[in-house]
Amino acid sequence: MKGKHAIGVALAAMIWLAPLGGASAKEAARIDASSNPRVERSFARMMRELSPAERQQLVAAIVQLNQREAYGDTGTARPDEAPSAARIKGQIAGMTAREIIDLANRTLSTKAELLLQ
């Protein structure tokens, strides 16, 4: 009877703690666009959670979205900053890596391929 009680207590604790995130699946990182430093921190966290192939796709998407931002609709370059997640924070606020990659794929006519070593 003691073993069943211990299992019941453990199960009850897991159910009680689940809303706090202790027993639930890890949620994908999202971009916090509330400030440039927070964008960069959340982007770094996102990169750490991805596989090498996913990192490559995300970096390519960020570069593509930055190119669009730099050139705008006029085709005239405004290369005043290096490519970064902070530069395009308005476009990627609250997004996951997959959502950022999908956005780049949907909105851009050119595709970038980066070979990271």
Image (cartoon, rainbow, N blue to C red):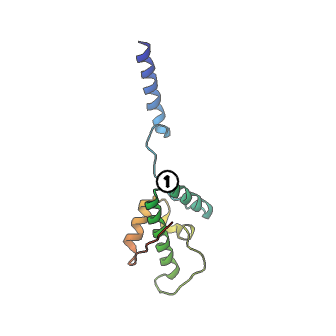
> Looking at the image, which residue is at 49% across and 69% down?
62
> Looking at the image, which residue is at 43% across and 61% down?
53
> Looking at the image, which residue is at 46% across and 59% down?
52
Question: Could you say where residue 116 lies in the image, as x and y percent from the top left?
Answer: 49, 67
Can you say whether 80 is above or below 106 in the image? below
Question: Could you say where residue 2 lies in the image, as x and y percent from the top left?
Answer: 44, 13
Q: Which of 28 and 34 lies nearest the eye of the viewer?
A: 28
Instruction: Residue lying at the far right in this picture: please name it.
Output: 37
Instruction: Residue lying at the far top in this picture: please name it.
Output: 1
Question: Could you say where residue 117 lies in the image, as x and y percent from the top left?
Answer: 51, 66
Can you say whether 49 is above or below 56 in the image? above
Q: Which residue is mark 1?
A: 49
Disc 1 residue type (three-letter): Glu
Can you say whether 3 is above or below 90 in the image? above
87 left or right of 111 in image: right
Question: Could you say where residue 85 lies in the image, as x and y percent from the top left?
Answer: 54, 67
Q: Quadrant of the N terminus?
A: top left
Q: Secondary structure at mark 1?
A: helix
Q: Residues within 10 Å of mark 1 (few under 14, many from 20)?
A: few
Q: Which of 52 and 65 lies nearest the eye of the viewer?
A: 52
Question: How many numbered marks appear?
Answer: 1
